[in-house]
Amino acid sequence: MTSLDAHRVVDAVWKMESARIVAGLVRMVGDVGRAEELAQDAVLAALEQWPEAGVPDNPGAWLMAIAKRRAVDHLRREERRDRGQERLAHDLVTHADDGARDVDGVLGALDGEVGDDVLRLMFVSCHPVLSTEARVALTLRLIGGLRTDEIARAFLVAESAVAQRIVRAKRALAGARVPFEVPSGPERAARLASVLEVIYLVFNEGYAATAGADLMRPSLCLEALRLGRVLAELTPGEAEVHGLVALMELQQSRAAARTGPSGEPVPLHEQNRGRWDPLLIRRGFAALLRARESGGPLGPYVLQAAIAACHARAATPEETDWPQVAALYEALVRVLPTPVVQLNRAVALAMAYGPRAGLTLVETLTGEPALKGYHLLPAVRGDLLARLGRHGEARAEFDRAASLTRNAAERAVLLRRAAACAGDAGPAEAVKAGRTGQAGPARTADTRGAGEAGEVVKAGRTGQAGPARTARVTAATPGGRRSAGAGVTLGDAMRLFLARPGLSAGTVRSYDQTLSRLCRHLGGEFPLRDVTSHLVAEVFAAAWGTAAGATWNRHRAALRSFASWAAEHGWAVAGLAAALDRRPEPRTRTRPIDRSLLRALWERPETPLRERTLWLLLYESAAPAEWALSLDVEDLDLPGMRGEVRARAHRLRWQSGTAALLPLLVGDRRRGPLFLADRRPGPGRMPPAADLCPHTGRGRLSYERAEYLFKRATRDLDPESGGYTLHRLRHSRLAHLGEDGWSAPMLMSLSGHTGARTLHGFVRVPRPADTVS
Amino acid sequence: MRFLMTTKGTDPNPDAAMLAEMGAFIEEMTRAGVLLATGGLEPGVRMVSSAGEVTVTDGPFTEAKEAIVSFALIEARSREEAVELARRFWRIVGDGEGMVQQVFGPEDVPGPGPR
């Protein structure tokens, strides 16, 4: 066997076995990074020996045996070094303190429960202390056995970036002392959701890129499917796991029909259903059945799979059971209330009950910040308007959608539809054009990989304009319209406005940004006199609704300037910018958390006492989380509502919220850390005595853990859904106090900031009236 | 990549231990998300088309031992992986003969996507 052959065989065997080998090793040595190093040692040994000695009879077992031997050597060395500390197999949750922690015992334990180990490894790789990218990379690496270069190629990033991501992820897991376990109770559900999210992310990464030349990306779909199937076998009672598998099987069943001869995407309703893979469809149905048998309320994956199944069941697009699809979207909206899901629901409603039903729902979405710049919103709206015969409005929507998409093919289709509308299409064409596609996998507000949602737009193909119509469109160009007395268009006014003498280049650039956006949204042909303050406010909300105050104010100032100029010329209504309020500008990069969100957080009944106290304390004291966590019971002055951070010679002060909770949290304790960890530390990693509670034996709550808990609890409040940081909680307090008129010295004395400079973002500085900065 | 693993001419009377081992192997392949479909086959009928004439012949044949007796459709990431799985299969079955063939899906067949 040549060494190249050996290399390929080792690679194949490694991919098949890596999850089990690494999982078993993590159980032995308690550290993901170390476990992977040991496993890689075994791979190197195979590469050395197999070309000479041939591939062993059972290569997987061979690799496992070598890796285990290396692990034992490693543990013996550790044992010698930490004699008396019994580090061996620390943190084996299932085999905690039985005193018989000899190597053989560990090895014996290692031979059972392999599946459980793989499941634990999945939960660790998808741990919330890691960023999403890190979770994905680590999961593909540890469970999928993919090499760093393969992951890099699949995600179109540099190999060094992936390598670093993985190194940092392993370090973060070790730093946070993430236990090798499948959590129980509500945490299990949250962590399982994270595992599912990672798998679906991997799937979509491949799904969105099927047309790519590199096979690595489409094969990500199969990798995700494989991970999903493995997970389904390990957690057979979880409906959502089967739901995700069903969803992926059904979507993958269309892989061959999703692209045309030159790689262009083909919308669901134009796909050749004969090319759908019946085997995967059947597997999808079977997985969906298993999900239903698992019971419980229908979760987002099960519902999305059920929608995909509706399409799979229809032999032709016309046979699609749209009322059923609409009903499923209705249920989905309840568990996944994102604007993108709503938009998909609107399409389904329109297909089931007519365009008016869909349009009513779409109208409620026009101000959604999450859909800002999302070309499918105007595309769907345009389609529905066209079907209702409102061609003028439809045309503006298609124009807007065309300006928002970055895909040239899509833009061409949309522009053609716009032209068709301008040609005053007859009712027959309106019906034809109305054959829209369905919006595909309902997603969260992540518009990046919109998947089949793009199919809605493609329906426009049926409404192409013929040559005669094109000629009529030309007649309706801006010049022609103006001479007909229709007034100045938005686009013309913008050009005139920017061409005025005396404007600096910077000002022109800045004004141009604002006005171009307005033109893109409303259409350059929009008559200026029809622009209302309400329309402007809607565009602003969609374009910059979530932008920082400074950005908002800059665009607002530009628009005010434009509005007064246009009003002077009698081209626009007065008070065009009246509906836009100036926004406060905290000049910090940390945006404050909204007060109402925090109020909602304090009022949540399910928050444990420890977390509730810590969060309120941090908010009320505006102190760094490290300081609050370093507090000991004996540092507290409960009647004085303050505590001493001895290391910093600083007094932390709190208010009535914390004061009401602290006595409950302290209970009978007299000394030791105020905030305690959930469990006692293992013998292998005993913290210093000062961090141990003499009453309960538990350790001090770590910053990492506290951060994780806060992030997890606030994930549903955060529009970016990553959850908030403790740092941001503290800064929110400073920002709120600044808004309430606190001065810099007052904030310094409360928060422990030593310089006024770092507080500038929070203190209101009077600024001259609106200027374009 | 999909592969069809077929066997022919294995021991016609497998013992219980082998069947149990095979059951465990199939279970493991399912758990690993590898196995898409599997089954056993009877010798069946043989069809030959020659000069427009289709001849259908019933079994059994004298060459019955060459009939395919089982198949497994698997999803693997590489040919090497498929071969490795087949090796594990043959370690259980013992002597015999078989094939590992890549199955081209609709995505591998050139042709128009949309109708």
Image (spheres, rainbow, N blue to C red):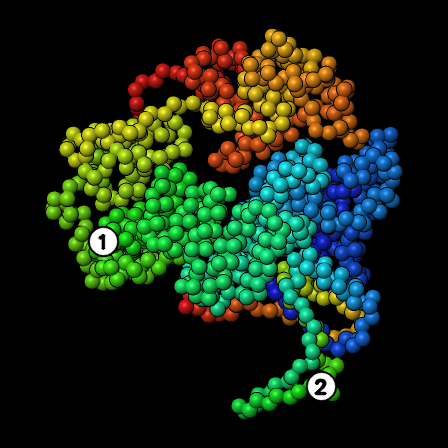
Tell me the quarter of the picture where residue A612 sits. top right
Q: Mark 2 falls on what kind of element? A: loop
Assign the N terminus of chain A to one quadrant of the image. Answer: bottom right
Q: Are marks 1 and 2 on the same chain?
A: no
Where residue A643 appears, as percent x and y from the top left, is 63, 12
Query: Would residue A44 be seen by someone viewing this image from the given angle?
Result: no
Where residue A115 appears, as percent x and y from the top left, is 73, 50
Q: Which amino acid does label 1 sit on?
A: Ala
Give the residue at mark 1: A422
Assign the C terminus of chain A to one quadrant of the image. Answer: top left
- Apparent side of residue A404 relative to residue A656 in the rendered image (left or right): left
Residue ID at (67%, 41%)? A124
Q: Which amino acid does label 2 sit on?
A: Pro
Q: Mark 2 lies on which chain?
A: B
Give the residue at mark 2: B60
Residue ID at (77%, 75%)? B10
Confirm or deny contact between disc 1 and disc 2 (CB under 8 A). no
